[in-house]
Amino acid sequence: MRSVVRRLHTEVLGDIPLMSSEPGSGGWAARTGWTVRMVTKVSKRPVHTTPVGSACNTSIRRSTPQALDITPPAVATTPARWHPHRHDHRKGVRLMAIKRATTRLRRITSEAIAEATGRDFRADAIADGSGGPAGNARLTAWTGLLLLVLFAAELVTLLDVRQMITWHIAIGTLLIPPALLKTASTGWRILRYYTGSRHYRDSGPPPLILRALGPLVVLTTMALLGSGLALVVAGPRTGQGPQVDVLDQRIDILTIHQAVFAAWAVVTGLHVLSRLVPALRLTVRPATAGGVQGGHRRFAILFVTAAATVPLAIVAVQAGHGWSNLI
């Protein structure tokens, strides 16, 4: 019997001893935690097992060995448990992120309000020739004031648009060249800043809120003027007829023009509130001693823009005579 156990042990475990005679070692099975059992079969009796090395080995003497069963030790697994300190740490991280975002938003808002109220302003660099960023800022400010006056006159025609439809069309057409000029001057400054021009980089960008508001102003203004021109060209019959399908609803050009006007009023209103004081400071009360070079160029650009509006307005009024017949 012992020879069978030794042979099976040698085939499975090699030279590793099952039991050690050294005190405290306990052999390979005791050191590793593996379970070693001899599966035996007794004639006319059910199969049973006897641990190897057990003091009670009488069953081994009366049994026939069949196999050596070696079972690895069970791995103790601890289920994931809710840890109060880990939960508090995650909650603290979220609170810190919210606090940082709130602080950043407050700082961005305060910067925009400070520049809008005139308490803070950018010191635009002055370059030879056109004036650089300082000259660009003055051209943009003068164009913006011209647009403000024209838009105010256009809003007056809305008090009775049917009676003043001709003026509404004429002033709306007059707005197109200055709007394009202001978009071009602002776009030029953005382009020069992001292409690494030294003077424009030194002057810095406007506050983040105004930078995010700028594209919305351009998009809504172009959409408003474009839909107005489309109404003039299409005429009253086509302009008030369904043209576009939106959510199974037929929408005409006039409805689009009115919806765009509502969005434009909100966006442009915020833009005017934030840029009016800086524009007045640059035009009415300039703080730069000796002026900025390029004044004659800026005046020439404004004069050509204003001159281009007159023939454009005449053509638009002639093309929109169909709307005058609705009075």
Image (cartoon, helix red, strand yellow):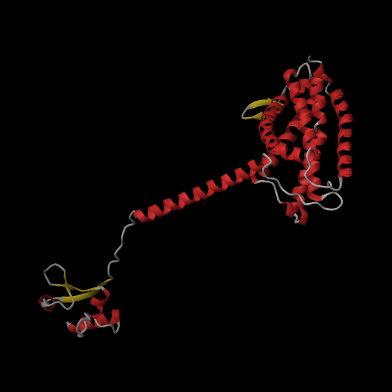
The tally of labels here is 0
Q: Is residue 99 left or right of residue 122?
A: left
In the rendered image, residue 53, in percent from the top left (x then y), is placed at: 17, 78
Compared with 136, 260 (above or below) is above
Q: Residue furthest front?
A: 289
**Residue 267 visible in the snapshot:** yes
Q: Give the quarter of the image for residue 239.
A: top right
In the rendered image, residue 327, in percent from the top left (x then y), is placed at: 79, 14
Q: Residue furthest top?
A: 327
Q: Is residue 211 left or right of residue 302?
A: left
In the rendered image, residue 258, in percent from the top left (x then y), is placed at: 69, 26
Looking at the image, which residue is at 81% across and 27% down?
Answer: 171
In the rendered image, residue 175, in percent from the top left (x then y), is placed at: 80, 31
Compared with 264, 69 (above or below) is below
Looking at the image, which residue is at 10% across and 77% down?
Answer: 58
**Residue 197 visible in the snapshot:** no
Q: Give the quarter of the image for residue 141.
A: top right
Quadrant placement of the N terminus: bottom left
Looking at the image, which residue is at 89% across and 40% down?
Answer: 300
In front here: 245 or 130?
A: 130
